[in-house]
């Protein structure tokens, strides 16, 4: 009995030490990336969708720190303004809105609801009138395993926001990206793409809805979109790459119900095993800003390294068909 109790205490101590060590490695990773050239992104304009929360917010903070002018494309102006206030406080130590002598960039909030083609068009119209250049577009916003819902235009919500909204956004901004070349597009996908398929006969999931499948389908669509776009952009000096960030502690799981009693355990596990938003954002930041990926296009990255894709994510005929259908769905067929 005493032996069993001692073994349990030892196991608990070992577990605690292991957790602390894994957090230490995480903190080290954060510090490592704190050493980037602080003025690296000066003069560059970066648009990040969903920049008020999680990965988008962490990406915005770092690119701002590197001197970029960051446009936060967010659906809720109040949440976005609050995030912007916090970011300015964290980076400047004051409530100042403008770039300061320490070389921190400028932060701009603009309303963008990817679940509304009208909103995407209005956002792009305004941006094209007011911004002389766009150096980096980061398609980051996303919605995960929500109950069956439709966008304003009648698309299944996850496919509509994660793929179609960004598809229209990117297409409407391509001219500005080309005239600002060399420029970059970064697409945030997920490893869960592996469990999706592009079922062309039911893209709006009207025949059946499975929230996990639909998330995976939308993330597969992100990769197919990237690869097709890379072909279309050959010779333009505009690159496009796609990434998976790993499992990150953000607000993405807002629709996942965790029983009250299991919450402490979930929190402990996520604290120990999930990446922080800053750790998770490293590949987005790398693809947006690193000279190492100058000219690289159509590739899939994780942890700042190129990774292999499953054949279904490299199927060129599916990618072309998805592109053609997406053009019809968002109404940009020429
Ligand atoms: N966290 C992970 O483990 C993980 C893993 C793989 C991939 N990803 C991908 O990473 C990306 C960022 O997610 P996150 O983890 O940072 O989650 P998050 O904290 O929930 O952030 C998602 C962002 O997307 C925005 N968004 C949602 N619907 C939108 C819409 N209709 N129009 C405009 N913006 C909208 C959210 O705005 P509100 O705050 O207003 O809701 C929020 O700013 C997503 O594409 C996700 O699929 C995340």
Image: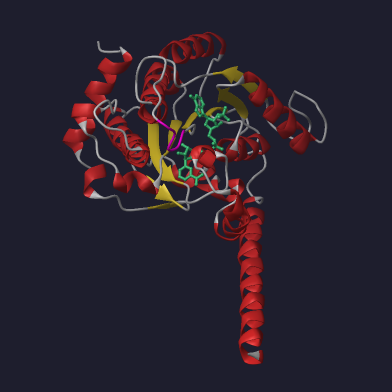
> Which percent across, then down, holds residue 158?
39, 30
233 or 58: which is nearer to us?
Answer: 58
The residue sitting at the front extreme is 1
Q: Is residue 323 visible?
A: yes
Q: Is residue 117 above or below residue 156?
A: above
The residue sitting at the left extreme is 317
Q: Quadrant of the C terminus?
A: top left
The part of the chain drawn in magenta is: 143-147
Classified by dominant secondary structure, the portion drawn in magenta counts as loop
Give me the residue at 66% from left, 50% from top.
Answer: 34
Give me the residue at 66% from left, 90% from top.
Answer: 2
> Which percent across, then down, holds residue 230?
31, 33
Give me the residue at 51% from left, 45% from top.
Answer: 286
25 or 128: which is nearer to us?
Answer: 25
Q: Is residue 321 visible?
A: no
Q: How is the image coloured?
A: secondary structure
Q: Is residue 264 above or below residue 291?
A: below
> Which percent across, then down, holds residue 252?
52, 39
Q: Quadrant of the N terminus?
A: bottom right
Q: Quadrant of residue 314?
A: top left
Q: Is residue 163 left or right of residue 108?
A: left
Q: Is residue 301 left or right of residue 261?
A: left
Task: Based on the picture, tell me whether residue 1 belongs to the magenta stretch.
Answer: no
> Which percent across, then down, holds residue 22?
60, 65
Task: Based on the picture, tell me whether residue 144 belongs to the magenta stretch.
Answer: yes
Give me the residue at 57% from left, 55% from top.
Answer: 262
């Amino acid at each position: 009995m005493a032996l069993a109790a001692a073994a349990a205490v030892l196991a608990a101590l070992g577990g605690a030490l292991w957790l602390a060590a894994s957090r230490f490695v995480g903190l080290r990773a954060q510090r490592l990336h704190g050493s980037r050239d602080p003025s690296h992104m000066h003069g560059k304009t970066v648009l990040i969708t969903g920049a008020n929360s999680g990965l988008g917010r962490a990406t915005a903070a770092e690119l701002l720190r590197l001197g970029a002018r960051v446009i936060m494309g967010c659906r809720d102006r109040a949440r976005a303004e609050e995030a912007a206030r916090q970011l300015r406080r964290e980076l400047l130590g004051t409530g100042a809105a403008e770039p300061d002598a320490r070389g921190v960039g400028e932060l701009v909030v603009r309303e963008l609801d990817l679940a509304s083609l009208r909103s995407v068009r209005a956002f792009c119209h305004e941006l094209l009138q007011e911004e002389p250049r766009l150096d980096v577009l980061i398609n980051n916003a996303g919605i995960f395993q929500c109950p069956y819902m439709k966008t304003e235009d009648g698309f299944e919500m996850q496919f509509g926001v994660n793929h179609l909204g960004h598809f229209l956004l990117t297409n409407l901004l391509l001219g500005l990206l080309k005239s600002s070349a060399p420029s970059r597009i970064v697409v945030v996908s997920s490893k869960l793409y592996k469990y999706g398929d592009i079922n062309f006969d039911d893209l709006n999931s009207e025949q059946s809805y499975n929230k996990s499948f639909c998330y995976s389908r939308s993330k597969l669509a992100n990769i197919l979109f990237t690869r097709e776009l890379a072909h279309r952009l050959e010779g333009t000096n505009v690159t496009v790459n796609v990434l998976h960030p790993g499992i990150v502690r953000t607000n993405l799981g807002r629709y996942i119900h965790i029983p009250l009693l299991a919450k402490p355990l979930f929190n402990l596990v996520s604290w120990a095993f999930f990446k922080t938003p800053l750790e998770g954002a490293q590949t987005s930041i790398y693809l947006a800003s690193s000279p190492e990926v100058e000219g690289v296009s159509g590739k899939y990255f994780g942890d700042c390294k190129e990774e292999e894709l499953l054949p279904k994510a490299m199927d060129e005929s599916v990618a072309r068909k998805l592109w053609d259908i997406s053009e019809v769905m968002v109404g940009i067929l020429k």
